[in-house]
Image (cartoon, rainbow, N blue to C red):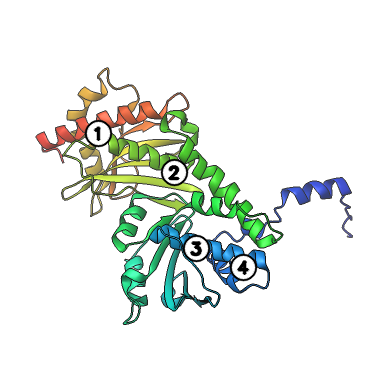
Amino acid sequence: MRRKAYTVSNEKRKIMSNIISQNIFDYATSELSQDAFISLLVAWFDSEKEELRDISKSFISSLYNEYYKKKLIFNKNASIKIYQQYHKIDIYFELISNGQKIPFIIEDKTWTEPHSNQLLKYVDKVSTATIAKEKIIKIFFKTGHITEKDEAETLEAGYVIIDTGWIYKFLAQYEIENSIFNDYKEYLKKNFYEKLYINNQKKQLKNWTTNATHNGYVQYAIIKAIKDELKDNILFCHTNLIKFTRNGRQWDTWWSFYNNGFSLFVKIKKIGKLHRIRLVKYSQTKIPSESKQKNLERFSLFINDFLDSTENKNIQKTKKPRGQAREIEIAFLELNNELLLKDVVKEFSNFMQFFLEKLTENEYL
């Protein structure tokens, strides 16, 4: 049986072409693609086109200025050497100018955080008898949300953070006829600068609605605000960093605020159609369902007073155990559309403070 042939009208073809992105960075979204673009910016130092050379020199000079807070002056014979995946460093290059070798390390991230002491390891690998650690320009470049862990580990390793705002504002200075440059600039603007950076800079928690909670940076802002509310309470472990995971478009964000043979977390997770802020107990060993139920019953003995009080409007007690084998959800606040996030933070912070104070007075865990 012959298949019927279909034709696509010019009008429909035009609509389809508008829907399908022609920007390569909409498809090549990994850190490797970002590495390649930054490497290209540096490599243009030797371009035959003057405008590309100027952009490259300006980029390198801006990195230098960001690190040392002083202007970099190139001599006429200045040159660049780029080393691909040198000691597994995302971008490593050396500028030779005025008789000096200036090494640059750029660790590039989209959404992930530093791991396995990689920032310190890179510095150790690069430093030699002729390259002192303090002479290495160390850049942590991240387009995604800058977390507490990012800030702590870069500070310890002596890196300077460059975020979406910095790189986009640099690129936006230039209007050139180069498809790769323009595609990356547009991709960065659409996916990070406008969606994440501008929101973080111009919006405050009081302006966000619960509809925005699917965004990782909003979840992060909620838990950071809760942490700040409790900053003067010595019962809470403020040195523990806020953490998150991202699986596809799904975010989970949490802060472990108590550790004593087990951990207590405040955690944001989507369950069903809505996100909820959860108070969670986590054990290092698996907890049978019967033990979970007994835990919940014991928790009820000293949290009922709060849950029945006028201070509480939205926090609910978990009645049946759910979740992972090592995890017990104690109570939660469901983020429905009627709630303002600033009120959510205040209410959940009050509950956490009450809960931990009662916890230290009782032996229910």
Mark 4 and mark 1 in contact? Answer it, CB < 8 Å. Answer: no
The local secondary structure at tag 3 comes to: helix
Q: Amino acid at mark 4?
A: Arg
Q: Which residue is mark 2?
A: 217
How many angstroms separate mark 3 from mark 4 (CA)? 12 Å
Q: Nearer the viewer, residue 280 or 268?
A: 268
Q: Which residue is most to the bottom?
A: 129
| Mark 2 burial class by Cα count in 10 Å: few <14, some 14-19, many 20+ | many
| Residue 120 placement (x, y as % from top left) | 32, 68
Q: CA distance from mark 2 to mark 3?
A: 31 Å
Residue at (31% x, 27% y) in the render = 347
> Of the numbered discs in the image, which one, if any, rests on residue 352?
1
Q: Secondary structure at mark 1?
A: helix
x, y percentage for residue 318? 31, 33
Q: Report the front residue among 177 and 53.
A: 53
Camera-side mark, 2 or 3: 3
Q: CA distance from mark 1 to mark 2?
A: 22 Å
Quadrant in which residue 322 is drawn: top left
Residue 324 in the image: x percent, y percent? 33, 49
Pick the front one: 152 or 346: 152
Instruction: State the separation of the CA atoms marked 2 and 4.
Output: 36 Å
Is mark 2 in CB contact (under 8 Å) with mark 4? Answer: no
- Whether residue 113 is visible here, answered yes or no, is no
Task: Determine the image quadrant of residue 37.
Answer: bottom right
Residue that label 4 marks: 53
Q: Amino acid at mark 3?
A: Ser
Choose the circle earlier in sequence order: 2 or 4.
Answer: 4
Q: Nearer the viewer's eye, disc 4 or disc 1? A: 4
